[in-house]
Amino acid sequence: MGCSTQIVAGAHFAICSQNQPVSEIPRRKITRTARLASLPLGAVSRSAASLGKRLSGVPAEEIAAANQARTADQLFRVLGELKGGAMKIGQALSVLEAALPEDVAAPYRSSLTKLQDSAPPMSMQTVSEVMQREFGENWRDKFQEFSDAPAASASLGQVHQAISKDGRKVAVKIQYPGADKALLNDFEQAARFARIAQPIAPGLDFKALMAEMRKVLAEELDYFREAQAQRVFALSYDGDVNVRVPHILSATAHVLISEWIDGTPLARIIESGSKVERDHAGDLYQTFLLSGPSRVGMLHADPHPGNFRITPDNKLGVLDFGAVARLPEGFPPAMGQLLAIAMTGDAERVIEVMRSQNFILPDVEISPTAVLNYLSPFTEPAKTDTFEFTRDWMREQFGRVNDPRNPDFSTGLKLNLPPQYVLVHRVWLGCIGVLSQLNAEVAVRGEIERSMPGFTDYLASNSAKSA
C-alpha cells in the first residue's frame, strides 16, 4: 500500500505496509531518523524502568543520577554517529551547557564536550576512497607520512595528521561522504518542526530566518570557500603575538590540507585549567572573535571550544573557517550604537534603533522598558573595565528569558532576528557561553570600544550633549 509519515516523540518515521519491500526506502534516511527518534524514546524507556526501581526501594536520587548518565552517553553516541546537522546540534548544546542548572548539566558536560572535537571515526577505506577521488590513486605520494588513525573528528569532516613532501606537519581534513545531503536533510526536518513555533513567536520573521540559516549551512559545506576565508585570516594574523591561524597548503571540494597546530584544547582548559590559564584563554578568545571584522572584514562564526587551542607559546590557535560572516565594513555601526544606548538606559531610543534594524517588526507592540531589561545580559559585561563570567551568572540570564513566568520570556517572543545578524548573534551568544564555562575575567569594555565604532561614537556624542 505504500508509506505514510507519522510524528512520534518529535521525530519522523516512515511506516510501510508489508506489501512494499523495505529495500525501496532510502535506508540511510530511515537509519538517521530512527537514531534521532531513539533519544526521546530512550528517555521514555528509562522512565518506565525507573518506576520499577522506585517501587523496589531504590532511592530517587540514585535513579535520577543513573538515568542522566545513561542519557548523556546515548546523546553523545547518537549525535556523534550521525555527524552532520545532528552533531552540530550537540556542538551548540555544548557551548551553552553553562546555562543549564548544575544538577542537570553535570551528567551531560563530559559527553557534550566530547562532541566539540571528537566523534566515532569513518573507516580508512572510506578515507582512501575520498582521497583517491580528489587526488588520484597515488594520493599517498603527496606525503612523506600519512596517519591512518584520525586525529580529530567533527560535524562535517575528519582530520588526519600527515607529513608533507617538504617535511611540514599538516592537518588533512576530509569531508564525510554524503555530509552535504545529510546536513541539509537534517536542517529541513528541523525547519518543519520549528514552523510549529511561528504562532508562539509572532515577532519572528521565520521565512527569512530559515532561508539565511540554510544559506549558512550550505556555505559550511563548501571547502573552497572555507579555504579562501582561512587564507585571508592566516595572512591577516601572520606573525601576531596572540593568535595563530594555520596556512592552507591545498584545497579541493572535499579535502583541506593546512598547517598543523599543536596545543591544549580549550575544552581541557575549561575542565582543568588554572584561574590564570582560564583568564588568559578567555581574553585571547574574546579578542580574536571581536577583532576579526575590523581586521579581516570577516567574523569567525563557529565559536565552540573544539575550534580553539592554546599553543605551546601561549597563543590562541584557531581552526575551522567553514562558517564566517563577511563584514567588509566591520561590525554594523548600529550594533555598537544599540549596545551603548541600552547601557545609558534610553529605552525609547533603543526601540527606535531596533525597529530600524528590523529587530522589532513594524506591527509588533512592545514595552521599551521590557526590551531594556531583556538586553541586560549583553550590556552588563560592558559596564565595567573587566567582567567575570560565571556559570551562575549565565544560568540566571538563561533562566530569566526562558521562564514563561518571567516577563522577559514574553518579550523575547516579540523580537525578531534579522537574517544579516544570524551569524553575529551566534558568535555573541556562543562567546558568552564559552567565557562562562571558562569562568574567565576579561576586559569586555575595552575590546568593544576597539571593535565597534558605533559604540564609542554614540557614547562620545552622548557625553558631549550632557556637557
Image (cartoon, grey):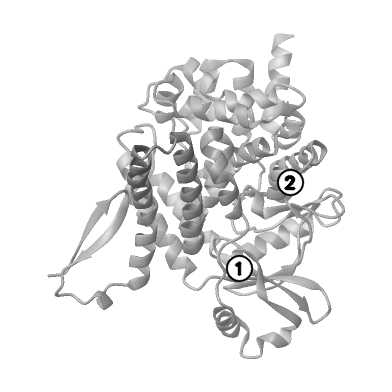
- Quick one: quadrant of the N terminus? bottom left
Query: Which of 205 and 288 lies nearest the eye of the viewer?
Result: 288
Crowding at label 1, few (<14), some or many (≥20) Cα neighbours within 10 Å? many
Q: Residue at the front extreme?
A: 56
Q: Which one is in front, 365 or 278? A: 278
- Residue extending farthest to the bottom is 137
Q: Which residue is mark 1?
A: 158
Q: Residue 275: give its label.
A: none
The quarter of the rendered structure image containing the C terminus is top right
Percent coordinates x, y for residue 433 in the rendering: 61, 38
Q: Residue at x 45, y 61 (%)?
A: 183
Q: Residue at x 66, y 64 (%)?
A: 228
Query: Rounded to the nearest whole Å, what is the CA distance between mark 2 and mark 1?
Result: 23 Å
Task: Tell me if residue 166 comes above or below residue 430 in the rendering.
Answer: below
Q: Are dots 2 and 1 in contact, CB under 8 Å?
A: no
In the orientation shown, which residue stands out farthest toward the top?
467
The residue positioned farthest toward the left in the image shown? 1
Residue 450 in the image: state x and y as whole percent.
76, 35
Q: Does 321 appear above or below 393? A: below
Q: Amino acid at mark 2?
A: Ile
Q: Quadrant of residue 181?
A: bottom left
Q: Position of residue 401 (x, y in %)?
A: 48, 27
- Residue 138 in percent (x, y) is at 66, 90
Which residue lies at the image location 53% right of the left edge and 41% below the top edge? Answer: 421
Mark positioned earlier in the residue sequence (2 or 1): 1
Q: Is residue 43 visible?
A: yes
Q: Secondary structure at mark 1?
A: strand
Left/right placement of residue 435 relative to residue 196 reads right
Helix, strand or loop at label 2? It is: helix
Amino acid, disc 1: Gln
**Residue that label 2 marks:** 269
**Is residue 423 in sight in this rendering?**
no
